[in-house]
Image (tube, rainbow, N blue to C red):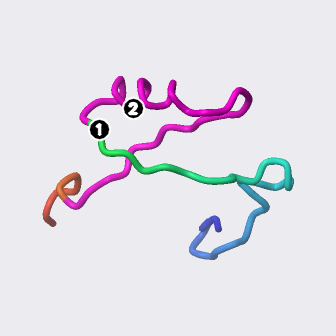
Amino acid sequence: MVFAGGAPSVIDGPFSEIGELMAGYWVIRVETMDEARDWAKRIPFRDGVVELRRVFEPEDFPAG
């Protein structure tokens, strides 16, 4: 969903084709992105795309 000019609109994505469907995910707790990359190198498949994303925690946001 995209918000523009105060109005929401639905978009086709991020997986617009069935072949782009995400098949699963892992959540791992690491201290650094380098450590996350090391874990990603152990993933047990040969072809595919791995997207590493940070999961934010309440401490990441300043009290308002």
- For residue 9, the mark is none
The secondary element bearing badge 2 is classed as: helix
Q: Position of residue 33 (x, y in %)?
A: 35, 29
Q: Is there CB contact under 8 Å for labels 1 and 2?
A: yes
Please identify the dominant SS of the magenta region.
loop
Identify the residue shown where x is 69% and y is 52%. Answer: 22
In the picture, measured across the screen, residue 63 lies left or right of residue 24, that is left
x 35%, y 23%: residue: 34
Quarter containing the N terminus: bottom right
Name the amino acid, label 1.
Answer: Val
* Image coordinates for residue 45, horizontal then vertical, percent: 67, 32
Find disc 1 in the rendering and name its residue. Answer: 30
Q: Position of residue 38 (x, y in %)?
A: 41, 24
- Residue range highlighted in magenta: 31-58
Q: Vertical placement of 36 versus 56: above or below?
A: above
Q: Which mark is residue 36?
A: 2
